Amino acid sequence: MAVDDGEAREAYDDVFEAVIRRAWLSVPEALQNEAGQRMREGRQAQLSLDEPAEWALHDTFRYQRGHADVFREVYRTSHHHPPSKGERLRVIDIGAGAATVAVALGEARGRGLPERIDYLAFDPHPGMISLGEQVLEHLAADFRSARYAESLEAVEFGNRDRLLFTFSYVSHQEAVRPEDVEQWASLIERAVARSDRAVELIYTTADNIHSIEPKIPMLGRRLEQVGIVPRVENIVVRVPYRWPGPVSHDGRVQWEPGHGLWKVQAERWVLRA
């Protein structure tokens, strides 16, 4: 049953309280302080595989609301056509974290029509997978299907599928290696070769990080080497900061506006062989 945007965002508030906020408040103070120090050192939202689950929880607690806001508005603003009646859209969310794109698509509603979407997430960090699976337990009823993939190599495509690859705040992750980008490119190359329709990609990332080489341009160059030249739509959005408040009210988080807007770089690619 379709619900409006306000109800969808309230649904996320319930998920946030049940899955994320309560778990974060149960983390020992020393670990909370370590996570806070990491943020003060400029390593916020930079998570490597050897870092503890508590840091994954901190990043989700602090950033998922804002990153979902950004992706939701990028998706709505783009020229992507939502699946029509009888169509199925497969979303392959790479570097999914705790299923942030699923949150965004659930809130997009009118454009997303989650009941026509098969959402498939992939993330290498066990802590993020655990959180994301719990988030999807709450959101999965809105989608045709929603789950995490064990590996990208196991992902299969049908020739009639509409395919959308998503990358939410992955491009500037220090932990992403060139071999990861190669794996993404091989997967997308396989999808383009298999599909009878154009394959789409939407990414969001910060536009104010200059010390880390972005990975999405690397992906574009790798695709061009095999004859897949993206048709690029640049997307401009203005999304204000929102942060979780220090207390909840009647079991619901209170979101506090921050000063300024998310500094966003976002594009939609249309990919054909």
Image (cartoon, rainbow, N blue to C red):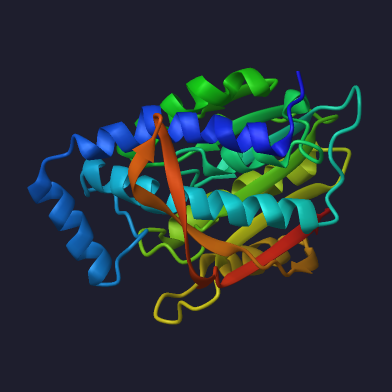
Identify the residue at horizontal 41%, vertical 75% (top origin). 212
Question: Which residue ends up furthest to the bottom in the rendered image?
Answer: 210
From what the image shows, is residue 211 above or below residue 5?
Answer: below
Residue 150 appears in view: no
Question: Which residue ends up furthest to the right in the rendered image?
Answer: 85
Residue 131 lies in quadrant: top left
Identify the residue at horizontal 14%, vertical 55% (top origin). 33
Residue 88 appears in view: yes
Identify the residue at horizontal 44%, vertical 26% (top origin). 133
Foreground residue, 114 or 2? Answer: 2
- Relative to residue 265, is residue 236 drawn left or right? right
- Relative to residue 31, is residue 259 drawn left or right? right
Identify the residue at horizontal 73%, vertical 27% (top origin). 3
How many marks can you see? 0
From what the image shows, is residue 136 above or below residue 186?
Answer: above
Q: Which quadrant is home to the N terminus?
A: top right
Foreground residue, 92 or 71? Answer: 71
From what the image shows, is residue 150 above or below residue 65?
Answer: above
Residue 123 lies in quadrant: top left
- Relative to residue 129, is residue 66 drawn left or right? right
From what the image shows, is residue 185 above or below residue 237?
Answer: above
Q: Position of residue 146 (x, y in %)?
A: 59, 24
Foreground residue, 225 or 162? Answer: 162
Q: Position of residue 105 (x, y in %)?
A: 67, 39
Q: Position of residue 75 (x, y in %)?
A: 73, 51
Q: Position of residue 45 (x, y in %)?
A: 37, 58
Question: Which residue ends up furthest to the front in the rendered image?
Answer: 250
Residue 164 lies in quadrant: top right
